[in-house]
Image (tube, coloured by chain):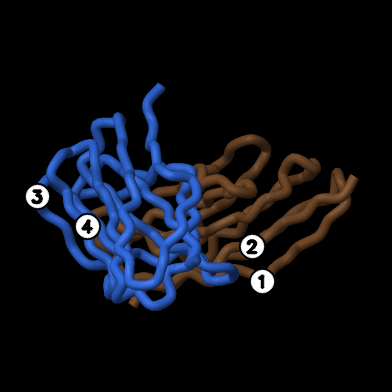
Amino acid sequence: GDSVTQMEGPVTLSEEAFLTINCTYTATGYPSLFWYVQYPGEGLQLLLKATKADDKGSNKGFEATYRKETTSFHLEKGSVQVSDSAVYFCALGGGNNQGGKLIFGQGTELSVKP
Amino acid sequence: DGGITQSPKYLFRKEGQNVTLSCEQNLNHDAMYWYRQDPGQGLRLIYYSQIVNDFQKGDIAEGYSVSREKKESFPLTVTSAQKNPTAFYLCASSSTDQVLSNQPQHFGDGTRLSIL
């Protein structure tokens, strides 16, 4: 079945460092890909999405490109801030997943130090 | 403001007790979902509903039950049959497009359930 694999955390960076969180997927059909962010004690917020190959999603300085050839959707940010500390989830939807169901990776915790 | 409201924020369950978690949305979304989140395991789908009076089991439905009598509401009951209920429970909703299925889900702030 469809699946999502994220790099394990926690990831610890200094402020203004470059961030990459790897996400790869396995899917049949033509899924959409999402990144969600979860701050402590809260629910998930949609960060960005891409609906077809070569699409680039971007929001708040974060970017991710839908790479069908490498089945990847890596999250990047050029200069992280302390306020970016959170757990980041890569998710897959559509394709053969009917009813709008999402399949989530296990999450990657990011900690940014001043 | 439109959104999803989960209540209570914290809930405690005694042995042999059923408890119900509330989820209400005013986004006019057709589809609603319940997820369970355990540390290091991401989110796992418990139940989902695409339309009023209809719902389907997700990956870990055993020990849980739901109802969908109104479009706005999708309560989750954690029954005494669920032997390990301690977790963070998240409710979500989305509009549905059966052709594209690329609509993002909107999440509530969660309910943390613990055993007394």
The percent position of residue A9, horizontal first and vertical second, equals 70, 67
Chain B display color:
blue
Q: Which of A11 and A1 is in front in this view?
A: A11
The percent position of residue B91, horizontal first and vertical second, equals 37, 49
The chain to which mark 3 is attached is B
Residue that mark 4 sits on: B66
Residue that mark 1 sits on: A8
Dot 1 or dot 2: first in sequence order is 1
Dot 1 and dot 3 within a common chain: no
The chain to which mark 1 is attached is A
- Other residues around mark 3 within 10 Å, as few (<14) / some (14–19) / many (≥20): few
State the image quarter where residue B14 is shown: bottom left
Discs 4/3, front: 4
- Other residues around mark 1 within 10 Å, as few (<14) / some (14–19) / many (≥20): few
Q: Residue B53 carries which label?
A: 3
The percent position of residue B105, horizontal first and vertical second, equals 38, 46
Discs 1/3, front: 3
The answer for how far apart the CA atoms under marks 4 and 3 are is 10 Å
Residue that mark 2 sits on: A108
